[in-house]
Amino acid sequence: MRVLHVVDSLERGGQETFLVDLAITQKAMGHTVGIFCISSEGVLAKKAKDNGIDVLSLSGNDNATENTLSALKRLRREINQYQPDAIHTHNRRPLFFTLIASFSRCRKVVNTRHGRAVGGLYWTLGAIFARRIINVSDDLFKQSSGFNRSFLRAKNRVIKNGIQIHSEVSQGLNVGSIIMVGRLNAVKNHLFALTVVRKCLDQGCAISLQIVGDGPELQAIEQQIERLNLQQHVTLLGDRNDVDKLLVNADLFILPSLTEGHSIALLEACAAGLPAIVSNVGGNGEIVQHSKTGFVIDLEDADGFASAITTLINDRQQWSEMSKSTRHWVEDNASMQHCAEQYSDAYS
């Protein structure tokens, strides 16, 4: 099968990491796989190319209108040359571009919704013309099914994200080391996480926080660290390509996001055996089993987050049990191989 993925770019992020790993797995399954980036290739393009995946992109200029028209023309040309059996689009803009560029091939278009933004022209066209609409969590499926008319709901299905599962797991040796991985934007709620760290420290719980990622909230995060006097307790690591090693050297993972789809960073933390403390939004509660593999806390409940952190730091037996349980859950439910097989079925 010839599969062409269409995405905004391959800059580092959960959706993009998932896409590259999916493409690599699909190639290993015998498919011919390419990726078209509407804008720039991004840092993850190298990993895709190194694994034999064709990566195509538009070398645009600063004129947004010209870039849009050029991207549509280039995408149409690539689709005609590539002759894909399936065109797999990721989120809204790639879906919209693909439907315009390949109108005669709409029945080959599959779209994955990685986040909660639905409604409007993009999703209406997708629901009408695309072959399949894939939601990465039950939460997204419920939301999109409520939006679409009943006769379109048959196109909706759920395929939860998978990851490449590494062999190493945390041994919990670095007691009190917490890690947070994700782009530095407001939706990830880093400022709230810093408030939780301050609360834990004030309660006598000795912890430190590593923040992995880059983005527009960096300055605000730096200011919050200084405001809360956390310079000795919080480390900003920036964009990293060794997240798997950072995870196995940590103790806990936190994700207090305001909204989530089906977090790749959270899945990777669980695979590393890290108990996770997450906000009760999106697909977080579908990954973390409350009181078994971590804690699912109400959004913006700083006391709840602090209490969960303190509990696991002070109770190493509970930490060990949760660590084993979360690793087993990922092995049973979130392998990339199983995910790729489900997508092969969705393409047909």
Image (cartoon, rainbow, N blue to C red):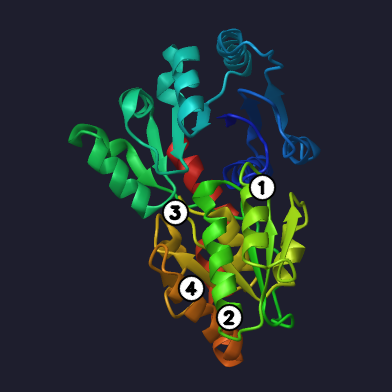
Element type at mark 1: helix
Q: In this view, does 169 lie to the left or right of 103?
A: right
Q: Quadrant of residue 49?
A: top right
Q: Residue at x 59, y 90 (%)?
A: 314
Mark 3: few/some/many CA within 10 Å (<14, 14-19, 20+):
some
**Which sits earlier in the primary sequence, circle 1 or circle 2?**
2
Pointer 2 residue: 202
Q: Could you tell me how far apart the alpha carbons at marks 1 and 2 are, in whole angstroms?
A: 24 Å
Circle 3: residue type: Leu
Q: Name the residue tied to disc 4.
A: 305
Residue tagged 3: 258
Of residues 250 and 223, the one drawn nearer to the viewer in this rendering: 223
Between the residue at mark 3 and the residue at mark 2, the CA separation in whole angstroms equals 25 Å
Where residue 322 appears, as percent x and y from the top left, is 54, 81
Q: Say which amino acid is labelled 2.
A: Asp
139 horizontally vs 316: left or right = left
Three-letter code, disc 1: Gln
In the image, which is nearer the foreground, mark 1 or mark 4? Answer: 1
Q: Which of marks 3 and 2 is nearer the N terminus?
A: 2
Q: Let me know if residue 119 appears in the view.
A: yes
Q: For the residue carrying disc 2, how many other residues have a C-alpha within 10 Å: few (<14), some (14-19), or many (20+)?
A: few
Mark 1 to mark 4 CA distance (whole Å):
24 Å
How far is the residue under mark 4 from the one under mark 3?
14 Å
Q: Can residue 324 be seen in this view?
A: no
Query: Considering the numbered disc 2 on the image, is that residue within a helix, a strand or a loop?
Result: helix
| Disc 1: which residue | 219
Q: Would you say the residues marked 4 and 3 are in contact, meaning their CB atoms lie under 8 Å apart? A: no
Q: Which of marks 3 and 1 is in front?
A: 1
**Contact check, label 3 and label 1, Cβ < 8 Å:** no
Amino acid of disc 4: Phe
